[in-house]
């Protein structure tokens, strides 16, 4: 009998409320939840299409083992036994660091599984842990760690009350917003203008957001750091500083003037393309606003100076009195004080074998993964678990990583489809779609509280996993047992889970006795003061939590050792002095070269959405290189014709689209494409798009020094027409 069930989407930070009509093992309809306490009926087209992904004809149903170049179905018992035996043998012969793990975005937007994965990594005792942070956001964690005392002490703009918001390197109309939960972003941002405030988008492309609300300002790709340093320079030159707050709650202010001394508005104009007068006018309006905030997203994060740029942004918000105030920049507050928990039990800092790069939040840079596999010697990576990710498409110099994966002695993929990365696995274990898992909002919302309207919600699974698909909490727990790697290194915890799994097979009482994900989530909810699952089920549209209003962070929740915000971390200061003059000179030297940015599109989401026929119709069956008419004319490029894009690392061929939305001197190429070899994806493999990350450099010389992030934007490229395709 068809019936309606409330839930929430887990595709991105917005986590919009949904109502699904369920009939047996099928989701027959999905619509927005108009009664959801935050999203109130807003949802994007991808959220409405979840069943197309979940019920894909390519859905994996059983464990698979690679044999003779193909795959054969095996049992879970065989898969776990063989994987466990191989991992135990490798660890015994080559040490714990011979085994590594990577997990991707799809599983990151749930709460429980990442916690289990962290436990598995600790149990393995390996330093070879990788995730997507070093591809899109580690700079923010690095800044938060140094300034606020913990990598997960994260700020967000108070969009519903601010009178001035500048969004740098973000496009909320298409990608929503990162590090903030903001359903209906353009409605919420447009309200800033409606109440008399100013909304400014700074981007190398005239983005969809700026066409919908506010105003747009072109900036040359990957020059944001000079713009922000000049912005800070101008504030200090005007002495527009809340000195009382700085003296009471912050340290390191005296060092700032020397760091930004040379970065005048006139100097930044040489490379950014933003006139000095325009920058000064922005500073004037920012300072005059009754509540103002600067916000940066992946367009800043993925540049070669992303950490320094975000540091300058956070310093600006802090010293002007806009940190921890209504309408300014707020510090998130989760159901527990997660930042305090991390500060008291900080994660271990390890170093990569290649380049001796430090870990961040326990993870090593993805741009080093291929070299960790390919370089012989002690600690060489020989086995890799990949959970819910597709690094063959998403990582820097992905063509090299693809070659590296084929040299592994063991690769295990936990996935719902056989994507490009899973194609290299020796074993593929079928996991779940988020509609098949119980859940609460993910880490950024539940634990870090990055939401202007705090809320909490529990959702049961909508349908049971098909075939032999298993919840990833079960998979990780079973892998830990099989590999002799008790979760979090605790034999007691692992024994309890093993006993629960055994009891769960008992007739009648098994389901009640087994420590199911529901029970674990219930414990977390109670620990965070959100009540029992029975209580949360009585509120199917979510429950509101106390608002974050400002004046509740400085002097109260700062988790640095001295309880103060550190404005000038020594390593940031040293890096700025050593690095910025060099990269600035490089910008001037290459001012006539084209620079490449990535971009998102409405009907795509990283590499996930291209196996849905509805999302690749007509012209959407490929990605395009977007070029300004002046740049196209100089190179003889014709709209719709094929071009070759070449970087120092690689080249791709794809059609061009000529548009005045691009800043002259910049080109854009949407990411997440390149599925030609994905024979496990019958729809995506018919697309003809090119993988932009083939053009990005990897290795120790290709990463940003402090955050370990790969440079995925602002890449210098040559573009030329292709005579014959």
Image (cartoon, rainbow, N blue to C red):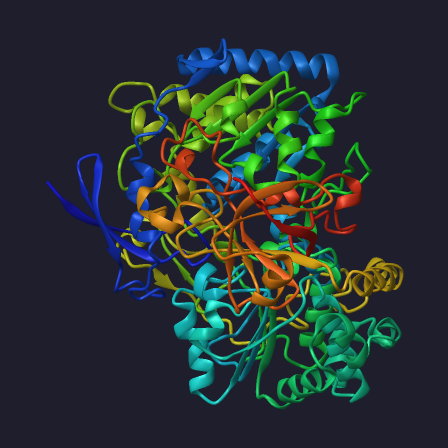
Image point (49%, 29%), residue name: 677
In the drawing, does residue 165 fall left or right of residue 373? Answer: left
Quarter of the image containing the N terminus? top left
Report x, y in % for residue 171: 51, 65
Image point (38%, 54%), residue name: 531
Image point (47%, 28%), residue name: 414
Q: Residue furthest top?
A: 68
- Viewer-closest of 196 and 254: 196
- Viewer-closest of 215 and 496: 215
- Viewer-closest of 659 and 725: 725
Report x, y in % for residue 495: 51, 23
Report x, y in % for residue 693: 61, 43
Please tell me how many numbered marks the rendered image carries. Answer: 0
Report x, y in % for residue 235: 75, 83
Q: Is residue 626 depicted above or below 623 in this figure?
A: below
Q: Is residue 533 depicted above or below 186 in this figure?
A: above
In the drawing, does residue 432 fall left or right of residue 632? Answer: left
Whether residue 364 is visible: no
Q: Quadrant of residue 45?
A: bottom left
Q: Is residue 569 depicted above or below 20 in this figure?
A: below
- Viewer-closest of 385 and 246: 385
Whether residue 662 is visible: yes
Q: Quadrant of residue 338?
A: bottom right
């Amino acid at each position: 009998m068809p019936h309606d069930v409330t839930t929430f989407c887990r595709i991105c930070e917005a986590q919009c409320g949904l109502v699904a009509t369920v009939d047996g093992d099928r989701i027959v309809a999905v619509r927005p939840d108009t009664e959801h306490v935050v999203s109130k009926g807003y949802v994007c087209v991808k959220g409405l299409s979840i069943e197309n992904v979940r019920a894909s004809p390519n859905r994996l149903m059983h464990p698979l083992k690679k044999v003779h170049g193909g795959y054969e179905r095996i049992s879970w018992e065989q898969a776990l036994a063989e994987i466990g035996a191989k991992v135990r043998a490798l660890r015994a012969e080559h040490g714990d660091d011979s085994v590594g793990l990577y997990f991707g975005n799809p599983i990151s937007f749930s709460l429980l599984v990442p916690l289990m994965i962290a436990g598995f990594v600790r149990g393995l005792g390996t330093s070879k842990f990788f995730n997507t942070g070093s591809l899109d956001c580690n700079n923010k964690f690095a800044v938060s760690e140094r300034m606020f005392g913990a990598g997960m002490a994260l700020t967000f703009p108070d969009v519903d009350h601010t009178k001035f918001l500048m969004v740098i390197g973000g496009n909320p109309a298409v990608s929503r917003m990162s590090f903030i939960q903001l359903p209906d972003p353009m409605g919420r941002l447009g309200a800033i203008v409606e109440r008399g405030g100013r909304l400014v988008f700074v981007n190398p492309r005239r983005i969809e957001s700026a066409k919908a609300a506010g105003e747009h300002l072109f900036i040359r790709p990957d020059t944001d750091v000079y713009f922000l340093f000049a912005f800070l320079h101008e504030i200090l030159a005007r002495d527009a500083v809340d000195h009382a707050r700085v003296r009471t709650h912050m340290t390191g202010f005296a060092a700032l003037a020397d760091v930004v001394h040379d970065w005048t508005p006139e100097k930044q104009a040489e490379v950014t393309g933003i006139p000095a007068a325009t920058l000064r006018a922005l500073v004037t309006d920012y300072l005059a606003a009754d509540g103002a905030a600067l916000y940066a997203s992946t367009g800043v994060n993925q540049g070669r100076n992303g950490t320094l740029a975000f540091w300058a942004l956070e310093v600006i918000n802090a010293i002007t009195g806009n940190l921890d105030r209504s309408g300014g920049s707020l510090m998130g507050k989760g159901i527990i004080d997660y930042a305090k928990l991390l500060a008291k039990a900080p994660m271990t800092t390890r170093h990569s074998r290649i380049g001796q790069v430090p870990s961040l939040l326990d993870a090593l840079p993805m741009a080093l993964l291929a070299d960790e596999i390919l370089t012989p010697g002690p600690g060489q990576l020989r086995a890799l678990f990949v959970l819910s990710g597709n690094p063959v498409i998403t990582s820097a110099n992905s063509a090299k990583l693809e070659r590296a994966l084929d040299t592994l002695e063991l690769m295990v993929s936990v996935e719902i489809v056989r994507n490009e990365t899973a194609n290299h696995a020796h074993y593929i274990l079928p996991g779940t779609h988020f509609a098949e898992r119980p859940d609460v909002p993910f880490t950024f919302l539940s634990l870090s509280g990055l939401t202007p309207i705090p809320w909490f919600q529990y959702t049961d699974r909508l349908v049971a996993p098909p075939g032999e698909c298993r919840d990833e909490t079960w998979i990780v727990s079973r892998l830990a047992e099989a590999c002799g790697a008790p979760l979090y290194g605790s034999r007691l915890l692992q024994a309890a889970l093993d006993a629960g799994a055994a009891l769960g097979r008992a007739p009648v009482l098994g389901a009640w006795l087994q420590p199911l994900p529901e029970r674990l989530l219930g414990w977390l909810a109670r620990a965070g003061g959100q009540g029992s699952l029975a209580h949360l089920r009585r509120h199917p549209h979510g429950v509101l939590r106390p608002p974050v209003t400002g004046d509740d962070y400085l002097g109260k929740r700062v988790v640095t050792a001295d309880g103060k915000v550190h404005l000038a971390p020594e390593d940031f200061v040293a890096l700025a002095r050593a690095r910025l003059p060099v990269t600035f000179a490089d910008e001037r030297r290459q001012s006539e070269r084209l620079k490449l940015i990535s971009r998102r599109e409405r009907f795509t989401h990283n590499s996930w959405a291209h196996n849905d026929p509805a999302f690749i119709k007509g012209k959407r069956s490929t990605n395009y290189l977007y070029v300004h008419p002046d740049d196209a004319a100089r190179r003889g490029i014709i709209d719709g014709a094929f071009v070759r894009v070449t970087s120092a690392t690689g080249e791709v061929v794809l059609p061009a689209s000529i548009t005045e939305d691009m800043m002259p001197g910049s080109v854009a190429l949407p990411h997440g494409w390149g599925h030609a070899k994905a024979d496990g994806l019958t729809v995506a493999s018919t697309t003809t798009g090119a993988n932009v990350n083939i053009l990005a450099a990897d290795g120790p010389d290709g990463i940003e020094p402090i955050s370990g992030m790969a440079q995925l934007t602002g890449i210098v490229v040559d573009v030329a027409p292709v005579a014959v395709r």
